C-alpha cells in the first residue's frame, strides 16, 4: 500500500486557515492556493532519488547531489486544479503539464469527463495529479483511472483539503498511489461539500460565484 501524508508544516496549516475564511477574496485565495501547492510540492518531493556527480567549483572539484533526472509531469483536474499548477512549477520548473477536465454533476455527484490532453511521453513520467478538494473522491479516482488507462504507472495525488470519505475511497480504488493531503476535515455534508472545508474551490479561485 502506498503512503498517505497529512501535512503538518505550520506554514501550510496557516495558509489553509486563511483560505477557509469566507471573507478571503479571489485574489488572495488564488495566491494562497498557489503558495500552498508550492509548499506541499516541497514536502511531497522529499523522496525523489538523487545521484552523486563530480563538478568543479571555482575552488576545486567537489561531489554534489543532483536529482536523478526522473521526468515529472503535473496534471491538474480542471478547473480548480489549475490553481495549484504555478506553485508546483515553481518547485519543478522542468515538469510537463497535462490537463484532465472533469466536473461533478451536482445531482448525482458523479464525475463527468470533458477534456483530456496529456504530454506525449506521459506514460514514462512520474505524474502529480493535483486538485484542491477530495470530497467523495469520484473526480480524482476517475482522473487517476484515465491516466492508468493511458499507461501511466507512477502517480501521486495532491489535494489541499480532503474528507475522510474521499480519502478512504481513493485509498481503496488506487492503493498504489501516494496521497498528499494539506488538511483532513471532518465529513461531507448532504450536498457532498466538505465540512468545514472552504466552499467551492473552483468558484473561489476564478471568482465565478
Ligand atoms: C470540485 C473539486 C474536485 C471535485 C471534488 O470540482 O475541484 O475536482 O469537486 O469532488 P469529488 O471528490 O466529490 O469528486 P468541481 O466538480 O466543482 O469542478 P470545478 O473545479 O470546475 O469547479
Ligand atoms: N468541491 C469543492 O470545490 N468543494 C467541496 O467542498 C466539495 C467538492
Image (tube, rainbow, N blue to C red):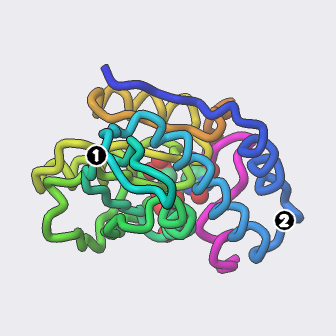
Question: In the picture shown, does residue 135 fall above or below 38?
Answer: above
Q: What element carries label 2?
A: loop
- Name the residue furthest front: 59
Q: What element carries label 1?
A: loop
Q: How far apart are labels 2 and 1 at the CA level?
A: 40 Å
Return the x and y of residue 56 as percentages of the image width and height. 39, 56
The magenta-colored residue range is 190-209
Return the x and y of residue 41 as percentages of the image width and height. 52, 49
Report whether 16 appears left or right of 159: right
Q: In which quarter of the image is residue 119?
A: bottom left
**In-front residue for pair 58/143:** 58
Residue matched to label 2: 24
* Tag shown at residue 48: none
Tell me if residue 191 is in the magenta stretch: yes
Q: Main secondary structure of the magenta part?
A: loop
Return the x and y of residue 23 as percentages of the image width and height. 89, 64
**In-front residue for pair 51/138:** 51
Q: Which of marks 2 and 1 is in front?
A: 1
Residue matched to label 1: 68
Whether residue 165 is visible: yes
Amino acid at each position: 500500500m502506498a503512503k498517505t501524508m497529512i501535512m503538518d508544516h505550520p506554514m501550510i496549516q496557516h495558509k489553509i486557515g486563511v483560505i477557509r475564511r469566507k471573507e478571503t477574496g479571489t485574489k488572495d485565495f488564488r495566491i494562497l492556493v498557489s503558495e500552498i501547492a508550492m509548499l506541499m510540492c516541497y514536502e511531497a518531493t522529499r523522496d525523489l532519488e538523487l545521484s552523486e556527480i563530480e563538478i568543479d567549483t571555482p575552488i576545486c572539484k567537489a561531489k554534489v547531489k543532483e536529482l536523478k533526472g526522473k521526468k515529472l509531469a503535473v496534471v491538474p483536474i480542471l478547473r480548480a486544479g489549475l490553481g495549484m499548477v504555478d506553485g508546483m512549477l515553481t518547485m519543478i520548473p522542468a515538469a510537463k503539464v497535462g490537463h484532465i477536465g472533469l466536473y461533478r454533476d451536482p445531482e448525482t455527484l458523479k464525475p463527468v469527463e470533458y477534456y483530456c490532453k496529456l504530454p506525449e511521453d506521459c506514460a514514462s513520467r512520474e505524474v502529480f495529479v493535483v486538485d484542491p478538494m477530495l470530497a467523495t473522491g469520484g473526480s480524482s479516482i476517475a482522473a487517476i483511472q484515465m491516466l492508468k488507462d493511458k499507461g501511466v504507472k507512477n502517480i501521486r495525488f495532491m489535494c489541499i483539503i480532503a474528507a475522510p470519505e474521499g480519502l478512504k475511497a481513493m485509498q481503496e480504488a488506487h492503493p498504489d498511489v501516494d496521497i498528499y493531503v494539506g488538511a483532513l476535515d471532518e465529513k461531507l455534508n448532504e450536498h457532498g461539500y466538505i465540512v468545514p472545508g472552504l466552499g467551492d474551490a473552483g468558484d473561489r479561485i476564478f471568482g465565478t460565484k
